[in-house]
Amino acid sequence: MTLQQLRFVRETVRQGLSLTEAAHALYISQPGISKQIKELEGELGVQIFARHGKRFTGLTEPGKAILEVIERLLIEAENLRETAREFAGAGTGGLTIATTHTQARYALPRVVHAFRARFPGVRLSLLQGSPTQIAALVLRGEANVAIATEALDLHPGLLALPGYHWSHCVIVPAGHPLADVERLSLEELARYPVVTYSTEFAGRTHIDRAFQAKGLTLEPVLAALDADVIKTYVEIGLGVGIIAAMAFDPLHDRALRSIDASHLFESNTTRVAVRRGAYLRGYVYDFIELFSPQLTRDAIRTAIAGAGDMYEL
């Protein structure tokens, strides 16, 4: 039994049971993967994959149990390497953060700047995507940390901790009738076409829920992935915008006006997530604490030890 064989099994499952796609992902021939999986099954004495001819059709019952063990073993193998790197090259290495555009654009610049000053030898990468894509990147080990508002707490394989709370605001062009409203109501807002986030992003569920609770229909004239796009279309008069309050910058968004909407929509929680069981190098803890000061090394370790589901801001 080799780690390579275990990786072949895991990648085949990740690629929807396609040996061809697994071979492409691992830069190896398809017959090579097939042979190694058969050898592993022979050594274990059970079939991991159900087959129809030469095609894999699913995991057998023993295969499902074996896959869980394989996932743990491969995580521990990576943990072994990370532990060695921690002592062999303190202050060097790589850190990959998976996050949304809003977090990367508005919440992370100060953190990245401070982290780079503290750890100049660490290669820092930002991967952007939807919350679902972000969660998958960390679960697959392709990113160390996920930062997003939606979805991260829905995956048992992730330890998702609350980073900070934030609210939405409404944005309108200068001179818009809503700009002079002292305390905006949903009824007033619903009279205008709305531009806001796509359903997966930035607390959109709270926006929808607020309209539904009032018996109002929200059908945005445009749904976008990030606040910069929303602001662009509000500025040209397509509609009024609903964005994360942090995304409005009075210095740069001079053609727009921001209206407080914290009383209209539930507050949102941006979470920081790591893969359960993964070894975190020291600088990973530091990055998380720079992002959210209450998430100290001790707090994270306590959560990893089993208190994570109860941890709240």
Image (tube, rainbow, N blue to C red):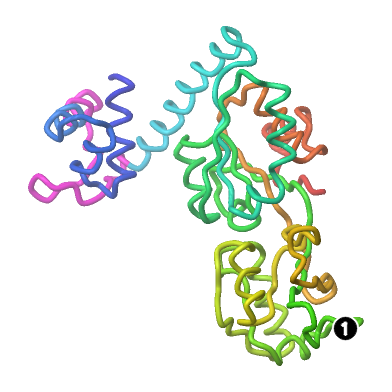
Residue 29 at x, y percent in the picture: 15, 31
Residue 201, above or below 313: below
Residue 83 at x, y percent in the picture: 56, 15
- Residue 24 occupies quadrant: top left
Task: Write down the residue under mark 1.
Answer: 180
Work out which quarter of the rendered image holds the N terminus and state it.
top left
Disc 1 packing (10 Å; few <14; some 14–19; many ≥20): few
Stretch in magenta:
38-63
Disc tally is: 1
Residue 192 at x, y percent in the picture: 68, 89
Q: In the displayed image of the protein, which residue is found farthest to the top? A: 88
- Residue 262 occupies quadrant: bottom right
In the rendered structure, the answer to whether residue 10 lies left or right of residue 57 reads: right
Query: Amino acid type of disc 1?
Result: Asp
In the rendered structure, the answer to whether residue 36 lies left or right of residue 168 reads: left
Residue at point 65%, 77% (across, down): 208
Residue at point 22%, 46% (across, down): 18
- Residue 296 occupies quadrant: top right
Residue 41 is a magenta residue: yes
Residue at point 36%, 37% (across, down): 67
In the rendered structure, the answer to whether residue 65 lies left or right of residue 82 reads: left
Out of 38 and 197, give the one closest to the viewer. Answer: 197
Out of 72 and 252, give the one closest to the viewer. Answer: 252
